[in-house]
Amino acid sequence: MVTTRDLEAHFEFECKACENGHCAKADVETILSEREGLKEFYEAFKEHIKECKRMTYGQYMFIIDREVLPEAVLWWHNHPEFKETHMSTAVGTDERPLNGKFVYMPFINVQVEHKNMDRNYWVFLRTYLPADDPSFPSVAEKLPAALWIEREVKDLLGLNPIGHPDPRRLILPEDFPEGVYPLRKDMDYKYSPITDPKTEYRETPEGTSLVPMGPVHMGIEEPAHFRLFVKGEEIVDVDYRGFYSHRGIEKTGEGRLTYNQVLFLAERICGICGYQHSVSYAMAVERLADVEIPDRARYIRTLMLELERIHNHLLWVGIASPYGRI
């Protein structure tokens, strides 16, 4: 079980919170002037922005009120000048042992100029949710990219996206006990409930026929169930259910392993891209701890990642060939 001391040790890596509106490394005006769009966003939402700080190179965090979260996400996503800007993902965390709150944080990939890393950057929109009401207004109805993300944090942390158009479970099975959330800090990683199986499917749209596919099918890389809604030969909609192979890796890494041991677990997330996951984890820890690795390590990583990339391309060419896709 993760203790408060473990969490405090982890968050010592994090860039310290701003004090009186000023970052430990730079004042707000300096931060906002570093990249295009930051000051414009700050002026638009300054009444709802609690803190602003630079996390690392090309990464900026705004701590904002939860009630304006959808408007803040859409402000970036619909920016008239940054055409390729998008909500890449979002994370939820349980920080109750530290401050008594939950956190929900969308990640915005701001594309000022295509492939120009000196101008492009990331914006993290961090909002705190009280323990007795861990809810936030959903953006999924206006931004489909958030549909699965919001369902995921609801499943695993109990963060409730108010107004979500499809609030069914995504990762947890329908028969998982109500009110039990695997990624909360008070959840034991060994907990494995036994319940009565049940399912929850969407209604078949009027005028369509149902064609089920899966949950095991040789044409996909892991078990998934597709309920295809068809009109004649045309597939007009689909009800998807995946995550049959969800193994609780996050909880195992958090509740049982040390920082060094997680590296070996990360290599086992995927059978054909293990190096990619382990390098991603190592780079995240290095950035949090402000560790600079030697050039020799960079060269080795680059070589191994390129070999893995080529291997994956060849693998999928081989898989696609029997199905007439190339």
Image (cartoon, grey):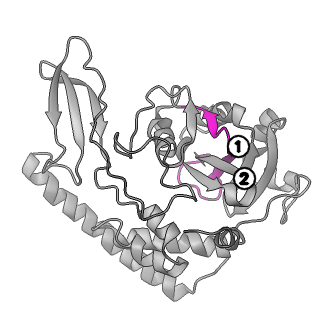
Q: Residue at x 40, y 69 (%)?
A: 276
- In the rendered image, the vertical position of residue 67 relative to residue 1, given as above or below: above
**Left or right: where does residue 48 sit relative to residue 224?**
right
Asked if disc 1 and disc 2 are in contact, CB closer than 8 Å, the reply is: yes
Is 134 included in the stretch rendered in magenta? yes
The mark tally for this picture is 2
Residue nearer the viewer, 138 or 39? 138
Image location (x, y in percent) of residue 310: 28, 68
Q: Which element carries disc 2, helix, strand or loop?
A: loop
In the depicted structure, whether residue 104 falls above or below residue 277: above
Q: From this viewpoint, is residue 210 visible?
A: yes
- Residue on which the image places disc 1: 130
Mark-to-mark CA distance, 1 and 2: 7 Å
Circle 1 packing at 10 Å, graded few (<14), some (14-19), many (20+), is few
Q: What amino acid is labelled 2 in the image?
A: Gly
Q: Amino acid at mark 1?
A: Pro
- Magenta residue span: 110-139
First in sequence: mark 1 vs mark 2: 2
Residue 100 is tagged as 2
